[in-house]
Amino acid sequence: MNAAKQNKWLTVKSVGGILAIIFFFIPFFFPAEGLSVAGNRMLSIFLMAVALWITEAIPLHATAALIIMLNILLISNRALFSLPDDFSAPPFASFFATLASPILMLFLGGFFLADGAAKFKLDRNLAKTLLKPFGSKPANIILGMMLIVAVFSMFMSNTAATAAFMAVVLPVIAKLPEGDRGRAALALCIPVAANVGGMGTPVGTPPNAIALGALNAQGINISFVHWMAMVFPFMLIVLLAAWQFLVRVFPPSVKEIKIEINSTYDRSPQAILFYFTAGLTLLLWFTEPLHGISSAIVGFVPVVVMLSTRLISEKEFHSMQWSVLWLVAGGIALGSGVGATGLDEWLIGLVPWDNVPVAAVAGMLALTALAFSTIISNSATANLVVPIAMSLSVSLGDEMSRVAAAMFVAIGASLAMMLPISTPPNAIAYSSGQVKTKQMALSGALVGTVGLLVFILVAPRVWDLFGLMP
């Protein structure tokens, strides 16, 4: 059975690789009308990226590296084939520079904090400590779990947060009788909170970093605190709505659950140094408007401290999620190439957007991101959709800002949580054996719908009211 599944998967990958090659050469043999030479070359790269990212014929980060290389070889000032004189080719170094984007440094800082929290068991100990005020009622415990996981997912990988907190919740699930619907509520509350909580900060999830990277490339800088001010209140609304849904649709049969709170904090010199480093980093992120130090620079602080003091060993350093950083860099490079060649304007011109209400456009962007992210990586989705969304916002004039367009895509990608394959937190929860696919689909559909409605219909009005939109 496993061999059959593997062969089927290999076939899918093989087909994806063939499609990527075909898509790549189509614009060379059948150039798109109204698109420049450079634009057609970029269209080749874009179509290839779509095929590779959807089918994962090669690893996602490998596709990102291929995009950077093809941008250099086809549309940069060092292109292998000549470009028209009227095309201002981007410097080849600008594509290499995406691998050292400030946004990547911000995200890297989040990786180091997450790994340190796991190494010194700060995440699990804090979870147990923070659960104390929520008592023993199942609904309150679920609320406590969701709030704690969401907060942790704002500052560390939501995948890491899910893995850590599933270890905390599984013993709690074991206290419920077999067949109790509350088991599903407890198992689902962790990935739902991790997915929703990840929206709250720039380092919470890769789509946020991709959106910020695209904005940064166009000279729009959104600070750590500014992002939180725009997203956190609405993220909390979605989280509370998800909590109510879980406790009402999957109510536990017991009235009380006893949780053993045995939190023993590491007090070694290394652990104390990490606590101080993490606290200082978070403090600097929250007070960026006061001191003016970029959140990306602040994000590099734990990297330097933890490497130089050996809080992170060489083995732990090599085991970090470097592939995610390459994926984000590839997305930035793709967006840069799409904008520089005019491919974005050509793609947008295929649809008469003047006749579409702005609210409908916002909904379409978020819905597209949600639909794509349900079946492929949310990072890949953000890489493909963010550049087009930002260019579309420019074509609409002042009716929709580039910030709103990028954020709608990032948020839509994060709200995709219907299937076990939609996000790593979903896969972790599903592997616990405590939740069925139809239960995950039901909760994911409701949370995604509520989230889209809140962010599309309510958030922009509040942003304008309080002057939060740059």
Image (spheres, helix red, strand yellow):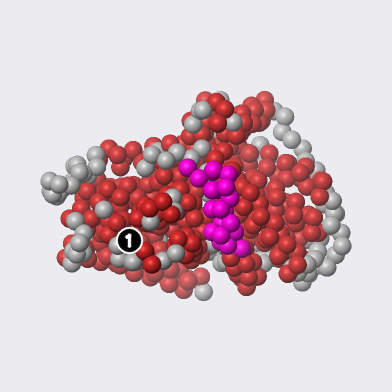
**What is the x, y in percent for residue 344?**
31, 56
**Label 1 amino acid?**
Ile
**What is the x, y in percent for residue 172?**
78, 57
Residue 449: image quadrant is bottom right
Helix, strand or loop status at disc 1: helix
Give yes or no for residue 458 being in the magenta stretch: yes
237 sits left or right of 349 in the view? right
Q: How many marks?
A: 1
Residue depicted at x 23% and y 55%: 39
Residue 181: image quadrant is bottom right
Q: Is residue 431 above or below residue 206?
A: below
**What is the x, y in percent for residue 215?**
41, 44
Give yes or no for residue 394 being in the magenta stretch: no
Residue depicted at x 50% and y 48%: 208
431 sits left or right of 299 in the view? right
The front one of 83 and 431 is 83
Res. 290 visible in picture = yes
**What is the x, y in percent for residue 345?**
29, 56
The outermost residue toward the right is 255
The front one of 1 and 136 is 136
Residue depicted at x 43% and y 68%: 9
Res. 60 visible in picture = no
The front one of 89 and 99 is 89
The front one of 187 and 209 is 209
- Region in magenta: 450-470
Q: Which residue is mark 1?
A: 348
Residue depicted at x 38% and y 50%: 331
112 sits left or right of 243 in the view? left
Q: Crowding at label 1, few (<14), some or many (≥20) Cα neighbours within 10 Å?
A: some
Main SS of residues in magenta: helix
